[in-house]
Image (cartoon, helix red, strand yellow):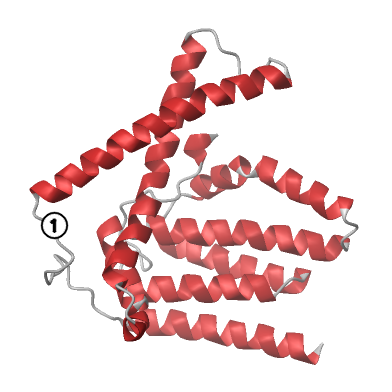
Amino acid sequence: MLNNLPVGRYYVANSNIHRMNPLSKIICTVLFIIMALFGIDLKTSFALSLLVLIMILNSSIPFKIFARAVWALRYIIIIMLLFCALFGLPVAGSIAFIINFVLIVLYTIILTMTTPPTELIYGFEMFLIPLKLIGIPTNKVALYLSMALRFIPTLLDECARIMKSQASRGVDYYHCSMSGKIAAIKGIISPTIKSSVLKTKQLISSMKLRLFSFGRARTNFRINKWHFFDTYLIFIHILILMVIVVRGLVV
């Protein structure tokens, strides 16, 4: 289940989405999240689902990867359904909210799987440039965000390795009682945290050995060009967002 969440993993391919500028992909992702938060109705969710499907087809990423990601979210979806039923929320609105949540996860997967970590840093740094006007070090914020995304698959792989190690020692995660599952989860948390701290120290040492510094100007290995497809896709996202906003005001 843990390995079914591909957030933070880069998938090598030569697609339209892969060739996009990292900044345009981040802008489209932000616009899509705003659309998903504003459009809490089934018609809008259906339209956003078509948009995500088109993005998936243009990314050249196997559809089964996204299907496994949705399957990995099944327990979260069940909890959200129970939460909506408990508070007596409208059925249509609850279903639309859950669909939009899944779509946001899928869109984020598209962003991270079509953009290398180094290019994500560049994209975040360019996107956060306006914050420099109020004295916020955007290069540090961009690096922290990209590192956080990069460590997600590392942590998931580490958890999966620990679970297999404990399973080989007789720990049963699927056929034990609830108290047994809680005890098994506690046994995963501690070694995972220790491993994360160790990997963080190794990363810091590696960056020091490479004389990494925020105070020095840095260049990019790749030249991130802005293509027509970048402008076209951003325009489509803005147009859809405007339709959702206008439709919400009219209703």
Q: From where the camera sits, is residue 190 visible? A: yes
Residue 171 lies in quadrant: top right
Residue 249 lies in quadrant: bottom right
Return the x and y of residue 65 as percentages of the image width and height: 49, 46
Q: Residue at x 44, y 16 (%)?
A: 165
Screen quadrant of the C terminus: bottom right
44 shown above or below 68 = below
Where does label 1 land, which residue? 212
Return the x and y of residue 108 as percentages of the image width and height: 49, 60
181 shown above or below 17 = above
- In the image, 196 versus 124, the foreground residue is 196
Q: Of all residues shown, which one is farthest toward the right? A: 88
Residue type at mark 1: give it: Phe
Q: From where the camera sits, is residue 22 visible? A: no
Q: Residue at x 56, y 87 (%)?
A: 239
- In the image, 243 versus 53, the foreground residue is 243
User: As drawn, is 103 to the left or to the right of 26?
Assistant: right
Screen quadrant of the N terminus: top right
Return the x and y of residue 86 as percentages of the image width and height: 88, 50
User: As drawn, is 86 to the left or to the right of 236?
Assistant: right
Q: Residue at x 65, y 87 (%)?
A: 243
Q: Secondary structure at mark 1?
A: loop
Q: Residue at x 54, y 57 (%)?
A: 106
47 shown above or below 210 = below
Q: Residues within 10 Å of mark 1 (few under 14, many from 20)?
A: few
User: As drawn, is 137 to the left or to the right of 236?
Assistant: left
- In the image, 224 versus 131, the foreground residue is 131
